[in-house]
Image: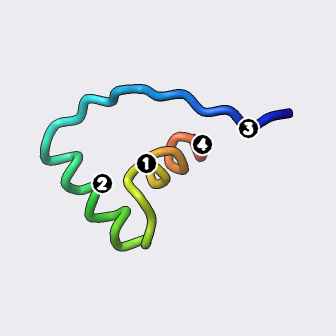
Amino acid sequence: MRNSQSTYPLRLPHSIKAEVVRRAKADGTSLNQFVATAVAEK
């Protein structure tokens, strides 16, 4: 099976986005990868 991607605009409050950016940076990953991993774990 081919790995496919799609885009989805995500609206977040500024405070939550800032926290997610901080955590992604601490993990050494991109914001996109951090969010994708968090969603996959749910």
List the residue tagged with mark 3.
3
Which residue is denoted by mark 2 in the rendering? Answer: 20
Q: Which residue sits at x=60%, y=42%? A: 40
Instruction: Say which of marks 4 and 1 sits in front.
Output: 1
Tag 1 residue: 32
Q: What residue type is labelled 4?
A: Ala
Q: Is residue 7 left or right of residue 5?
A: left
The residue at which mark 4 appears reads as 40
Q: Residue at x 47, y 28 (%)?
A: 7
Task: Give the side of residue 6 with respect to residue 17, left or right.
Answer: right
Residue type marked 2: Val
Instruction: Please report the residue visible at 23 percent of the width from the left and 35 percent of the height from the top.
Output: 12
Return the disc, 2 or 4, that comes first in the chain's sequence: 2
- Mark nearest the camera among 2 and 1 is 1
Type of amino acid under label 3: Asn
Residue 11: percent from left, percent from top: 25, 29
Report crowding for label 3: few under 14, some 14 to 19, many 20 or more residues within 10 A (C-alpha): few
The earlier-in-sequence mark between 4 and 3 is: 3
Is disc 1 placed on a helix, strand or loop?
Answer: helix
* Displayed quadrant of residue 28: bottom left
Q: In which quarter of the image is the C terminus?
A: top right
Percent position (x, y) of residue 41? Answer: 59, 46
